[in-house]
Image (spheres, rainbow, N blue to C red):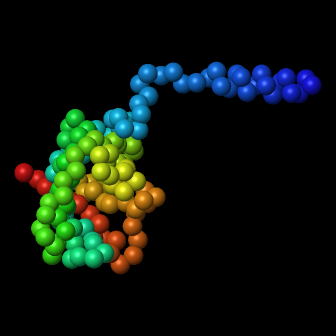
Amino acid sequence: MRVFIGIVLVALGLSSCKNTDSSKQSSHEKVVSKGFYNDSIKGLYIGTLPCADCLGIKTELHLKEDYSFTLNKVYLETSGSVFTVVGNYTIKQDTIKLYGNTITPDTHQYLYLKDTLIKLNLKGERIKGMLSQKYKLPKKNF
């Protein structure tokens, strides 16, 4: 019986140690890791990403200082229609996730590496294989 009471007391003690830090933010809000300044990320990234059933996807991703983004995609050799998504992004360590009304963050994750965004797979890992080097969006310098 004493063991049971001891376990209950430990459990209650641990549950009362909630982090009530108001600076904690939800996953849809700004998350910037220590030492990773937003000015190095904001900007326009342009490239053509691989596509399973077309010649490629011309992609323009504009990351803004207020943690909003605009993503324009054109599927090459199709109708030429521009698909635009707007939303917010988060930064955690060196990974950027896009949150928009028609996308989920797992489908739009990028690794930031020296003024280049590298598209990640659904697990947040770098894409491997013959086309792995083609999943890059270099930053456009004005």
Q: Position of residue 31 (x, y in %)?
A: 37, 36
Please give left or right for residue 1 compared with residue 125 in the image. Answer: right
Q: Position of residue 22 (x, y in %)?
A: 44, 21
Compared with 128, 12 (above or below) is: above
Compared with 138, 39 (above or below) is: above
Residue depicted at x 39% and y 67%: 127
Query: Based on the displayed image, in which of its 4 quarters is residue 114 positioned?
Result: bottom left
- Farthest-out residue, left: 142
Please give left or right for residue 57 compared with residue 15 in the image. Answer: left
Residue depicted at x 41% and y 38%: 27
Residue depicted at x 81% and y 28%: 7
Q: Position of residue 59 (x, y in %)?
A: 19, 61
Query: Based on the displayed image, in which of its 4 quarters is residue 131 positioned?
Result: bottom left
Classify the position of the N terminus by image quarter.
top right
Residue depicted at x 42% and y 34%: 26
Query: Based on the displayed image, in which of its 4 quarters is residue 67 positioned?
Result: top left
Q: Out of 125 and 101, give the one closest to the viewer.
A: 101
Please give left or right for residue 30 compared with residue 22 in the image. Answer: left
Residue 139 in view here: no
- Farthest-out residue, right: 1
Q: Out of 51 and 131, give the one closest to the viewer.
A: 51
Residue 110 in view here: yes
Q: Out of 103 and 34, give the one closest to the viewer.
A: 103
The count of marks equals 0
Q: Position of residue 74 (x, y in %)?
A: 17, 64
Q: Out of 105 and 45, give the one closest to the viewer.
A: 105
Compared with 68, 137 (above or below) is: below
